[in-house]
């Protein structure tokens, strides 16, 4: 019973830990559906395609997460139920308690019926089980030799000392943290949409190192919407729009962007 309670606590903890991911996937699905609803009112049917793909992806991810979590909970609790119902196996050479008691009662009944009086209680001899041999003492391993850190050149040490501390979002309030999470998600989705709609221009732009100029119309439209929705955090030293542009559009090469035309307070690569 104690083992079953421990497993149930583990299952409950796993469910609680996964609620955050399920909630985030649900929010992404709601946002994708809102974008799809807004795109359906456009005069161009092709504008609804990115939102439709995002909604389909979010729905599939949410369904997969719930399916995995359901299988985990059902499988774990089913295993505990089977273990609780199955009788514990008796050691080799020792008769099971239930079978010994049943056989003793049956013999006593037969003897009482034949002789008309109570039968003597049989004694069961339990064989002595030899204790297991003692385990050999573990040989202590030699302690590893301490490794000294490599010396850092003076020029690099000066750069490290002058570098500003990393921006810690966890120190912000709850509303600002939510704005940062949404801004990161929206910037990533925008860059994925542009990459999907203009693959040829992106390929040439990477070679010519002029992605910002070549994709100016799409980037300006996406940046205008980004600034409108996340104006409250634009002065923070982080620019998700630039970071995802480098990772997705430029394939990790900041020089492929050319001249980045949007103001930002975040350090660039």
Image (cartoon, rainbow, N blue to C red):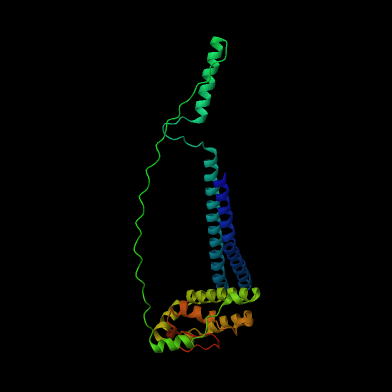
Q: Position of residue 54 (x, y in %)?
A: 55, 68
| Nearest to the observer: residue 116 or residue 244 | 116
Q: Visible in this render: residue 109?
A: yes
| Nearest to the observer: residue 80 or residue 105 | 105
| Nearest to the observer: residue 218 or residue 89 | 89
Q: Position of residue 188 (x, y in %)?
A: 53, 75
Compared to residue 155, the image places residue 45 above or below, namely above
Q: Position of residue 146 (x, y in %)?
A: 36, 72
| Nearest to the observer: residue 132 or residue 64 | 132
Which of the 4 image quadrants contains residue 116? top right
Q: Position of residue 187 (x, y in %)?
A: 55, 77
Considering the image in quadrants, where does the N terminus appear?
top right
Compared to residue 12, the image places residue 26 above or below, namely below
Compared to residue 18, the image places residue 221 above or below, namely below
Which of the 4 image quadrants contains residue 169? bottom right
View extreme (top): residue: 115
Compared to residue 96, the image places residue 176 above or below, namely below
Point 50% across, 37% down: residue: 88
Point 46% across, 77% down: residue: 247
Q: Visible in this render: residue 42?
A: no
Total marks placed: 0
Point 54% across, 82% down: residue: 239
């Amino acid at each position: 019973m104690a083992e079953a309670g421990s497993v149930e606590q583990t299952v409950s903890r796993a469910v609680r830990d996964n609620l955050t991911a399920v909630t985030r996937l649900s929010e992404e699905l709601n946002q994708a559906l809102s974008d799809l609803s807004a795109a359906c009112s456009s005069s161009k049917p092709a504008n609804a395609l990115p939102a439709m793909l995002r909604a389909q992806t979010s729905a599939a991810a949410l369904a997969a997460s719930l399916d995995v979590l359901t299988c985990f909970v059902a499988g774990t609790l089913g295993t505990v139920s089977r273990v609780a119902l199955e009788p514990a196996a008796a050691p080799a050479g020792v008769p099971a308690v239930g079978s010994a008691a049943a056989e003793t009662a049956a013999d006593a009944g037969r003897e009482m019926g034949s002789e008309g009086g109570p039968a003597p209680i049989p004694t069961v001899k339990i064989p002595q089980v030899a204790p297991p041999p003692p385990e050999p003492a573990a040989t202590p391993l030699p302690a590893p030799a301490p490794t000294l850190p490599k010396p850092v050149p003076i020029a690099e040490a000066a750069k490290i000392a002058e570098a500003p501390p990393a921006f810690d979002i966890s120190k912000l309030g709850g509303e600002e943290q939510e704005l940062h999470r949404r801004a990161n998600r929206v910037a990533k989705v925008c860059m994925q949409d542009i990459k999907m709609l203009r693959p040829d221009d992106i390929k040439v732009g990477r070679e010519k190192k002029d992605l910002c100029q070549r994709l100016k119309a799409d980037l300006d439209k996406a940046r205008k919407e980004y600034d409108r929705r996340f104006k409250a955090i634009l002065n923070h030293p982080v620019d998700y729009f630039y970071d995802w542009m480098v990772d997705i559009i430029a394939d990790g090469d900041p020089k492929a962007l050319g001249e980045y035309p949007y103001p930002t307070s975040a350090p660039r690569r």
